[in-house]
Amino acid sequence: MDEENMTKSEEQQPLSLQKALQQCELVQNMIDLSISNLEGLRTKCATSNDLTQKEIRTLESKLVKYFSRQLSCKKKVALQERNAELDGFPQLRHWFRIVDVRKEVLEEITPGQLSLEDLLEMTDEQVCETVEKYGANREECARLNASLSCLRNVHMSGEQARGMETRPQHIGLGSSRFPCLCCRPG
């Protein structure tokens, strides 16, 4: 998949439901692999090592772009054509894993009760109020808000769709031991 080399006209073209599902599933495979690698780096490698930290930040940045890609694909399908399968992308549980929100918090959320898109539409205060209802602590809330801000910036700017180079910015996606880099215009 070469989403970084799409032209602006391709990015703006509507997609059929089937094409959007295919793209979202392909991106989901990349997300699954990247999350697995990210969690391995966080748990099995010396996180104080510069190389490990760089790899963690690189994976986090890629994951933000992958989630943005899923949001873009979904947005290109007319509302009346969307189905439950497409509405399942992007997956909130995967976003919580990237941000390092405890599994217990996500388990409190009934499927369909809250989505990543819902969180993206909220203010920082609303996000905190919402996730605290499910047991999130202040540190998790802060990481979640920072990560959502990063995703909004990447998604709204369309950097990944236009293939623009991005420069990392510290925002702390992971736990405090695992600062992440987010993308911003270079």
Image (cartoon, rainbow, N blue to C red):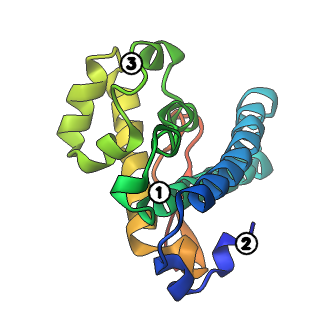
The answer to which image quadrant residue 141 occupies is top left
Q: Could one spot residue 53 in this view of the protein?
A: no
Specify the quadrant that holds the N terminus.
bottom right
Secondary structure under tag 3 reads loop
Q: Residue at x 51, y 75 (%)?
A: 159
| Relative image position of residue 61 (x, y in whole percent) | 60, 57
Horizontal side of residue 71 vs 44, given as left or right: left
Q: Residue furthest front?
A: 81
Give yes or no for contact between labels 1 and 3 (Cβ–Cβ under 8 Å): no
| Relative image position of residue 147 (x, y in whole percent) | 43, 47
Q: Residue at x 34, y 20 (%)?
A: 137
Separation of disc 2 and disc 3 at Cα?
34 Å
Vertical side of 172 occupied by 176: above or below: above
Q: Residue at x 43, y 50 (%)?
A: 82
- Residue 2 got which mark? 2
**Which amino acid type is marked by label 1?**
Lys
Front position in the image: 180 or 94? 94
Residue position for label 3: 109
* Callout 1 crowding tier (Cα within 10 Å): few <14, some 14–19, many ≥20: many
Q: Answer with mark 2 or mark 3, whichever residue precedes in sequence.
A: 2
Front position in the image: 50 or 100? 100
Q: Answer with mark 2 or mark 1, whichever residue precedes in sequence.
A: 2
Separation of disc 1 and disc 3 at Cα?
22 Å
Query: Which of pointers 1 and 3 indicates the residue nearer the eye?
Result: 1
Horizontal side of residue 139 vs 174, given as left or right: left
The answer to which image quadrant residue 3 occupies is bottom right
Residue position for label 1: 74
